[in-house]
Amino acid sequence: MTNSQSYNKKTNDYNLTKNQKIVFNLLQNSGEPLKAYAILENLKREGLKSPLQVYRALNKLVELGIIHKIESQNSFIACSNSNCASNTAFTICRRCGDVKEIKNNHLFEQVSDLGKKNRLKVHRFNLEFYVDCNGCKVN
Amino acid sequence: MTNSQSYNKKTNDYNLTKNQKIVFNLLQNSGEPLKAYAILENLKREGLKSPLQVYRALNKLVELGIIHKIESQNSFIACSNSNCASNTAFTICRRCGDVKEIKNNHLFEQVSDLGKKNRLKVHRFNLEFYVDCNGCKVN
DNA sequence: TGTATATTGTTATATTATTACATATCGTGA
DNA sequence: TCACGATATGTAATAATATAACAATATACA
Ligand SMILES: [Zn+2]
Ligand SMILES: [Zn+2]
Ligand SMILES: [Zn+2]
Ligand SMILES: [Zn+2]
């Protein structure tokens, strides 16, 4: 790749299996959060037939840290951060639900520091800022 | 009350209705997160009969900020913070699921500052530290 | 090859949450 | 006091999300 902004994680980087690949590709191409049953609908043409096929792939991809679950939406989004290391930070519009992953290493360090200062043995964290997004702010 | 640590929010402080009161009291007495259908089971003796009665009460209590939803568990816990103002911070044990609300005003300010520094119009935030709790750390 | 591990396919089922609609209660101003 | 709108309740049905159980395949690798 010529440009770090256009870098996308490759499915082969992780030895993904067939189902894992097609689910991951869909999420990466979508760029926005998708729900499991929406993914299933989308991928019926690719041969997926049951929810479990989708959930199994999603669970594995979450485990690898290359997608994240937006718990409050039961949706899944491809990681757009090359190094979030399973720590996650998002903005979520409280009106339209638009989700963006925060890419700010300084913020990640500061949140980790907050955990340390509170003497917590933090394995990972998840931070969600509920905001008015640019599209909704004006209304 | 003689002691701020023993202070519990009173149902009457919020003009709660009958169903809201019994759900809130159960959560406050429990002290740990409960799931909607577990609440329903518990409160059948109090006359609750349908999931919707529970969900309606829970939604209202969340809106008031006196309980919080732990999204990753689909569970609900009474707020143990007198002033979280709908911002929330928790530790969640990644092994046993034990949840504790963080009471550290300084932390809340710092996280709010992180939002401001990122030029976000933050309505509220939710921060989850996935930890090994004291009971599970030794294992 | 043999064997353990991981993945897949499929059906059924469990869990979580909302829609729809009828009824009742509460607050407030005429 | 009454009328009215807003809020809360009761109930049944159903939607949306997720997992259990089990058989069959594929993969890694000693
Ligand atoms: Zn990420
Ligand atoms: Zn928006
Ligand atoms: Zn709280
Ligand atoms: Zn624990």
Image (cartoon, coloured by chain):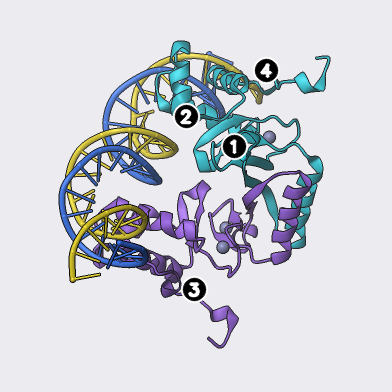
Chain colours: A cyan, B purple, C blue, D yellow
Discs 4 and 3 lie in a common subunit: no
Which amino acid is tagged 3?
Lys
- Crowding around mark 1 (Cα neighbors within 10 Å: few <14, some 14 to 19, many 20+) is few
Q: Give the farthest residue toward the right.
A: A2
Residue B87: % across, % down: 61, 57
**B13 is higher (above) or lower (below) than B67:** below
Labels 1 & 2 near each other (Cβ < 8 A): no
- Quote the CA–CA distance across marks 1 and 4: 38 Å
| Residue receiving disc 2 | A36
Circles 1 and 3, Cβ within 8 Å, touching? The answer is: no
Task: Tell me the subunit letter for badge 1.
Answer: A
Residue D19, by quadrant, is top left
Kindly indicate whether the residue at mark 4 contacts the one at mark 1 (C-beta within 8 angstroms): no
Residue under label 1, please give it: A136
- Residue at 69% x, 66% y is B104
| Circle 4 residue | A12
Residue at mark 1: C-beta within 8 A of ligand 2: yes
Using the rendered image of the protein, determine whether residue B4 is visible from the camera's viewpoint: yes
Judged by depth in the image, the label closer to the viewer, 1 or 2, is 1
